[in-house]
Image: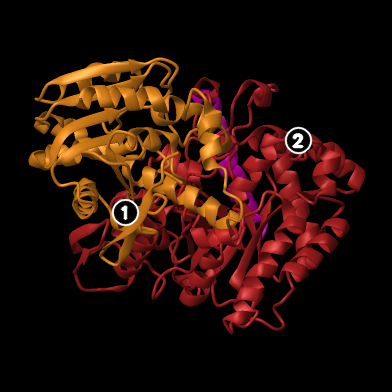
Chain colours: A orange, B red
Amino acid sequence: MSAFEETSLSINGADFRVWTAGSGPKLGVLAGFGGLLQWSPFLAKLAETRTVIAPSLPGFPGGGGRAHVDLDDALDWLLLVREILNGSGLTDEDLVGISLGAALAGDVTAVWPHKTKRLVLVSPLGICIDGNPMADPWGVTPQDLPALLCANPQALEAHQKMPEGGDDLEWEVSQIRANEAAARLLWPTGDTGLGKRIGRIFCDTLIVWGTEDKVVPPAYHPIYKKGPKGAVSERLIEGAGHQVDFDQPEQLANAINEFLG
Amino acid sequence: MKLMWFHLMPYTELPEDFREENPGIWVDINSRLFDPERAHHMYNDFMDELEFSATCGFDAICVNEHHSNGYGLMPSPNLIASTLARRTSDTMICIMGNSLALYNPPTRVAEEMAMIDCISGGRLIAGFPVGTPMDTCYAYGQNPSMLRDRYYEAHDLVKRAWTEREVFSFNGRYNQLRYVNIWPHPVQKPHPPIWIPGGGSVETWQWCAEMDYVYCYLSYFGYKIGLNTMRGFWNEMDRLGKEPNPYRAGFLQFVGVAETREEAMRLYKEPAEYFYGRCLHIDPRYAQPPGYTTEATIRARVEGQVATAAKKATARGKTATQIEDIIDQGYIIIGSPDEVAEQLRHAATEMNVGHLMMLCQFGNMSKQLAAYNTRMFAEKVMPQVSDMFDDKWEDHWWPTPMPAAERAVPNPTLDGSLAEAAE
């Protein structure tokens, strides 16, 4: 995998990790459900053609400790994510969001349309159809969560395996904390209010779904496709579950590269 | 020693294959199993049992709150407590309790409990649990990452509503009220005693110490397992310089009393196996929502009550579901009056607990057997236990009702005549 650089961004006394790798045009990446515990094959693949910038989201690994507990509503989340993106140099760039990261990427683009050049939403969350909500990631045991999120749970489990020499308690706490941060944003039905704002997305947008996504029902596909006002294209990736970036990192990176040109 | 009579109000007609055919007793329990007309009888039986226990001399009768739960049919313990306030006269009424974060606004709790304190003439004990994950986060949709903050804020609001006599505004993080001014106020001053049912969280122990509240460990697994938790509690009290007054603590214990141990085994086998086999069939999926347990508690490797129950439920055979194992592991104290009294004295001494909450009805126990168990306990066990601690310690956390002579007499006989009106 390609080398990456880790820097830190200080906002309101909390330090947010920013990973940067590769060269070429900048591409921001907001990670999915559990955040990123380690550098990933997906980021490495993207970094072959782009300057990948992956800042950590509040409460997720590298995400300012327990910064999420100060965030009570969508406005709190979006203002902080905007600051993180600004501090990471992502002020007028292409932006990729995955799962929960897509909910936030979509929303910051809706609220600050001029600050996202093109948008990629991979298995986006943030909208809830009454009576047909996303699968409940907190309605399965932690042991069963990888199989809900991925068609190939081993890929996620490998990512979650602590590197040698790590502190096992802190490693565990960081994952529980990420899970809590996700819950803080999405509990109980996954509705962040994005549905009210998605029509304010005016840039070219790519929506990507895994054909084996067990989290977001297919009924959501037309909502995300028809929601933005800009041109929207859609890709389905075979053999991928909700976390397409872990299931099919190369195919996902290729789809993004094709869209961005 | 205070001996209290606790009712969970379990649905008593879960099918024999409930454990095999259903994922769990809580949250997504099959609602088709609930027969309202059978529940009509269950509720009335349960209230009969509570009222009967009051006549037997228990110091208090206790009710608690659960939601979407097959072993706890009291989404609103306050409804039951209000009937008990009318139908009993001297027994204290312990609501164990209201999960404060679930009420919007929480002043509703302040109002209802104040009503019950007024109706009962100041006999209320106000329990404030955070609430289990199943009740709060899943059945009531509360965000687990915000639950504890909401709870503490609601507590502050309720306490102020009870104690402040001027109209005030409350601008909390989760609750904003321009006018707080509850009618009625509680009889007890400054407010009814506050008890906190909790698991093994160090922060809860510290908070109870700071606020001078009673800490209650409501265990389904008996004193043998509860001992570790209570030792942790008393170590923390010692560290904080609090005197080891046993009335700082409460503990729940299942009991089954009969003339002989053999008779007790025969009588209580079925309800015990019903409770541990069917009622405690807790689905681990709903036991640990992220954020419910604090990071400090995770780091201390402490596990809560329902998480323990759920974990036991995942590996068959770990939760004892056969009467011999249930007794061996100390979940239920069963035996002759002398045997039960000896074990209870031992448990209360070892745990240093001055408030024992007895579960004399459990599982699918009939009203008649519950009454027998209750009477046997009251007549033959209570006298052997009730003197504990009183020579040395005072219970500062017990209700202070109005004098009996000044309290209203329930159920007055009225004939509706003009003569009566003229009196």
Tag of residue B290: none
| Residue B43 covered by magenta stretch | yes
Where disc 1 sits, the SS reads helix
Magenta residues, dominant SS class: helix
Which residue was labeled with disc 2? B273
Residue on which disc 1 sits: B108
Residue at 50% x, 41% y: name it. B134
Cβ atoms at labels 2 and 1 below 8 Å apart:
no
Q: Is residue B242 above or below residue B186?
A: below
Q: What residue range appears in magenta?
A: B35-58
From the viewer's perspective, tell me whether residue B207 is left or right of residue B175. right
Q: Chain of mark 1?
A: B
Q: Where residue B322 sits in the image (x, y, percent)?
A: 81, 36
Residue drawn at 27 percent across, 52 percent down: A72
* Number of residues whose C-alpha sits closer than 10 Å to that of mark 2, classed few (under 14), some (14–19) or many (20 or more): many
Q: Earlier in the sequence, mark 2 or mark 1?
A: 1
**Viewer can see residue B109:** no
The image shows residue B71 at horizontal and vertical percentages of: 59, 37
Answer left or right for A249 relative to A130: right
Q: Position of residue B256 (x, y in %)?
A: 78, 48
Q: Amino acid at mark 1?
A: Arg
Secondary structure found at label 2: helix
Quarter holding residue B179 = bottom left
Q: Quadrant of the C terminus of chain B?
A: bottom left
| Residue B281, image x, y percentages | 64, 34
Above or below — where is A256 with respect to B206? Answer: above
